[in-house]
Amino acid sequence: MKLPLVLFFAAPTLLYADGLSDVRATLQKLQSDQLLRARVEIKSRHSGGESGKQKQSESVSTVIVENGPEGFKLSWSP
C-alpha cells in the first residue's frame, strides 16, 4: 500500500529530466576517445491569422552535437 503512494509523490520529480545531463551521461558511458557526432534537423510549421488571410510559414533548424577529446560541443543554425 505504501509503494503506490511513494510512486505517486515521486513521479513529478521523474518527469523533469534534464536532457543535456542525460546526453552527457550516455556519452560518458561510451568511454571512447573517438569523435562522436550527431546531426539533428528540426522542422516547424506555423499557421495563423484571420480566417480570410491565413498565413503559413516553415522553418528548418539544425543542431550538431559533438563529443570527443576536446569535450562536448553544441552548434546550431537558425
Image: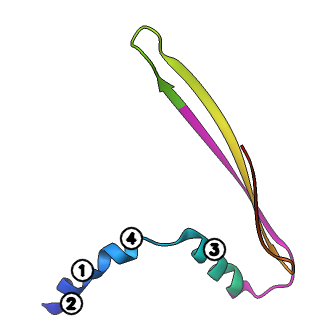
Residue at the farthest bottom position: 2
Q: Measure how far apart labels 2 and 1 are at the Cα level.
A: 10 Å
- Disc 4 and disc 3 in contact, CB within 8 angstroms: no
Q: Using residue 12 as the reference point, say whether residue 35 is left or right of it.
A: right
Could you tell me which secondary element the residue under label 4 belongs to?
helix
Q: Secondary structure at mark 1?
A: helix
Q: Earlier in the sequence, mark 2 or mark 4?
A: 2
Local crowd size for mark 2, using a 10 Å CA cut-off: few (<14), some (14–19), many (≥20): few
Residue at image location 36% in from the left, 77% down from the top: 13
* Image coords of residue 23 (percent x, y): 63, 74
> What is the distance, in whole Å, between disc 2 and disc 4 at their CAs?
18 Å
Circle nearer the viewer, 2 or 3: 3
Q: Nearer the viewer, mark 2 or mark 4?
A: 4
- Amino acid carrying label 2: it is Leu
**Residue on which disc 3 sits:** 23
**Lateral position of residue 19 relative to residue 2, left or right:** right
Kindly identify which residue carries mark 1.
9
| Among numbered discs 4 and 3, the one appearing first in the sequence | 4
Residue under label 4: 15
Label 2 vs label 3: CA separation? 30 Å
Label 1 and label 4: CA atoms lie apart by: 11 Å
Q: Residue at x 62, y 41 (%)?
A: 43
**Which residue does the numbered mark 2 point to in the structure image?**
3
Mark 3 or mark 1, which has the lower sequence index? Answer: 1
Q: Amino acid at mark 1?
A: Phe
> What x and y, as percent, mark residue 78?
71, 43
Q: What's drawn in magenta, residue-wise?
A: 29-45
Q: Secondary structure at mark 3?
A: helix
Q: Residue furthest top?
A: 52
Residue located at (39% from left, 70% from top): 15
Q: Residues within 10 Å of mark 1 (few under 14, many from 20)?
A: few
x, y percent for residue 76? 74, 52
